[in-house]
Amino acid sequence: AAGIGFYCLQLVLAARKPCANPCVAELSQQKDVVERYDTTAKGFDSEVGMSEVLMGINSLRKKLAKKCHGDVLEVSCGTGRNLGYYDITGNGAKVDSLTFIDISPQMVEMCKKKWDALYGSERKRKALKQHLQVRFMTGSALDAMPLAPSGKKYEAIIQTMGLCSTPSPLPLLTNMVKHLDTSNPDSRILLLEHGRSYMPWMNNILDNSAEKHAEIHGCWFNREIGDLVEAAAEQTGLEVVSERRHHFGTTWVFELKP
């Protein structure tokens, strides 16, 4: 309850500034703000950390990351807020490799530093799965991405809070599918996103605060995430295994399979 209250308070405060663009909910009217992450990388965790704890986002991240197995690709990895949740310790661990990619070199650098802080000591390294391979890369998820260290496509592709920050969310989703091992029925695409609510009054708040939020944080949190995922699934032939929503429907969790 405290998390929901905090979330609503943030939105109401942000909504005090009237929306200058009545079409702000339309993707075509949303300017590209991805470069914002280059300047917010160092302070990003401190900006979102407390709200994610109060809202239970960290718990959702953990549940999603624990579903990853085999060769894993994390798209739009940011500062590595999913690190620590993957099943990578002990030789019975499900994950064989981790590849992190983000368009912002500053974000990737923060992700590397966080990995070193978590697993840099000799004791922590010895606890990792034997032969686990970890890679950090700068690049756009709209372009061709490298194959897994095994030379194959990925068995799990995960993205958390990424569809809000790209100017081309649907092409990003379909490109993720191109890098998934669709010959394996156990392969998965796992998404944790924030977008429009099923409550009209909440959508009014989101729309009124969207431009200011995008300017500050680099993301458009009023997108129709469900429509985007359904369109990507239809175009690529993937099946939406599960769709769950939280926080008045503004937090979306998806699992897709071949």
Image (cartoon, helix red, strand yellow):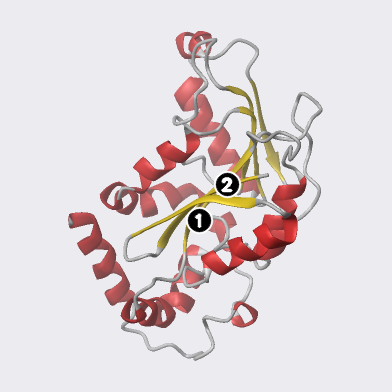
Residue 180 locus on image (x, y percent):
72, 41
Q: Give how far across and how far down residue 117 sits, in percent.
A: 46, 26
Q: Which residue is mark 1?
A: 40
Give the residue displayed 51% in from the left and 40% down from the top: 80
Give, as a three-letter code, the residue at label 2. Met
Residue 48 as seen in the image, left or right of residue 95: left
In the displayed structure image, the side of residue 17 where residue 132 appears, left or right: right
Indicate whether 91 appears above or below 239. Answer: above
Look at the image and tell me whether residue 140 can be seen: no
- Disc 1: CA contacts within 10 A as few (<14), some (14-19) or many (>=20): some
Q: Are discs 2 and 1 less than 8 Å apart at CB?
A: no
Q: What residue is shown at x 52% (from left), y 83% (from top)?
A: 24
Spot occupied by residue 61 in the image (x, y as percentages of width and height)? 43, 42
Instruction: Kindly state the secondary structure of the residue where label 1 is placed.
Output: helix
The disc placed on residue 107 is: 2
Q: Position of residue 19 (x, y in %)?
A: 43, 87
